[in-house]
Image (spheres, helix red, strand yellow):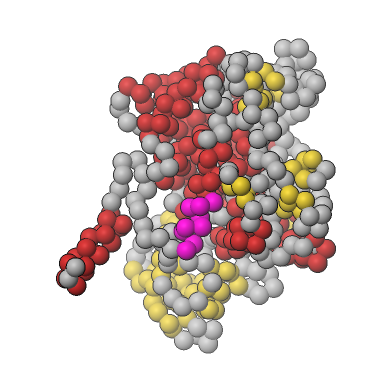
Amino acid sequence: MSWYSYKIGFLFVCTLLFVFTIQGQTSLTPATEQSEYMETVQKATFKYFWDFAHPVSGMTPERTATPTIVTSGGTGFGVMCLVVGVQRGWITREQAVSHLTKMTKFLSAADRFHGAWSHWLDGRTGKVVPFGEKDNGGDLVETAYLVNGLLVARAYFDQQNPQETQLRDQITKLWETVEWDWYASHGDGHLYWHWSPNYEWAMNMPIRGYNECLITYVLALGSPTHAIKPEVYQNTWKKSDFYTNGNQYLGYTLPLGFPYGGPLFFAHYSYLSLDPRKMDDGKTNYWKLNLAQTLINYTHCVSQGEKFGYSTDNWGLTASDDYNFYDAHSPTNDNGTISPTAALSSFPYTPYASYQAMRYFYLKKGNPLFGPYGFYDAFSQVKNWYSNQYLAIDQGPIVVMMENYRSGLIWKLGAGIAELTTGLKKMGITTPSYPTGFYMYLPDPKTNEVDLMRHTDRATYILDIAVKGKESVKLELTDRNGKVETVLLNKALTEGIHEIPFVAKGGKYQAILSQGTKQEKVLLNLR
């Protein structure tokens, strides 16, 4: 082959890599070592929801040890994983639609309790499998996770053909027949988690915040057929001893929630389809809330390295299996158990720390931790214990939140679901009007630095900025002595949030964002 022919062939392949798009799939981009690790882990984890799906119902088993018991909430996470699988080209659009059609038909015939499904179902029959002695009826929180996933699928499968039209219609029917208002009909103005035809309200669990249940209120308020009243949200969710916080932990201020933030799934489950960067109720910015909780969790783990074998690469506490069976691990309930889902599902918040953890789990832990469906549920270095199980509620957020970091896919779909927007507005949660500045970052309280990693798929650094007003903005990268290395931006931008890609050598810099006489700086450690 001549050099000329080789060069033309090379340019053709590169062009394909950048512009070739399969219908309904992500455009191919040049592979990097980082993107290959991301793809390997994300795709393996996805297989739990595809290869291990129940053959009759299409729903997701609770865990690998109980393949017949399917879980409503974990299935909702899995539905979003199927959307990711289509977008990534792991399965075809037609395969996903066929699978989801089977699932929605099963759900329409399964046991329901005023429209809500139980936590567990028999995947063969759709009959309730009690989660506890009195927990044999509707579970509104698990139902919310399921419905949220179905609404994301309805938004994604938008083609005007009989198969996708039927799927959308079936999802809408399931969604609109959930009686959210029934679960607020106990007589005390509260929204309740459970109701059973045998035990009625005996579980006695009002859905109070702050925890993993925020999406339940978004859907209950956004329902076009059975919406609850906004005062139910105010009088239940916000009336608890662990809603308002405002204290500082390990250098980070936590607006809401338990001391030290609680288990990390609080920052994951409700935010699979809700973009926290665009959520603010006037008192709480939900991006800063979730970022603070994640950094507190990370910093706690680093501080406990000598005791438990944690490190900057080995971190992440959340609910998972452990050597005593199962627990909600957190900085205030720490027995040395690391759950890979904690760090991996935090990719949008802490991409560098999450990537370091992923590499450590994969390269240093290897076979005892990584199996056919990705990372096993948990391990303890000090006990030399490794789980042999996968759990749906832990695998699902890995796939979805890694994708939200990589492409923002599920967040973009969620932003287009009118009922979610309606629910958020009724809660007083709207897109904030950020002042011009570096809105996404919480610097390390000891170094005052922000770790910035090259985006795994784009192979460039990305600075996230906000712009307010029509005046031109200037973004400069300087060395620590203030010498300008490069001007990244110098023009007027539309109001809102922006991603500014740039190329630079690794090292320590200062980014300076100027608009008129206003100036904001952030110290960067480019990794």
Q: Is residue 35 left or right of residue 342?
A: left
The residue lying at 78 percent from left, 42 percent from top is: 327
> 69 or 292: which is nearer to us?
69
Q: Position of residue 412 (x, y in %)?
A: 44, 44
Q: Position of residue 256 (x, y in %)?
A: 70, 49
Location of the N terminus (image quadrant): bottom left
Residue 106 inside the magenta-drawn segment: no
The residue lying at 62 percent from left, 51 percent from top is: 370
Check the image and report above or below for 356 versus 504: above
Check the image and report above or below for 503 versus 362: below
Number of callouts in the render?
0
> 223 or 388: which is nearer to us?
388
Check the image and report above or below for 248 versus 94: below
Residue farthest front in this picture: 1
> 77 or 207: which is nearer to us?
77
Can residue 331 be seen at all in this image of the molecule? Answer: no
Q: Is residue 413 left or right of residue 524?
A: left
Main secondary-structure element of the magenta-colored stretch: helix
Q: Is residue 150 left or right of residue 158?
A: right
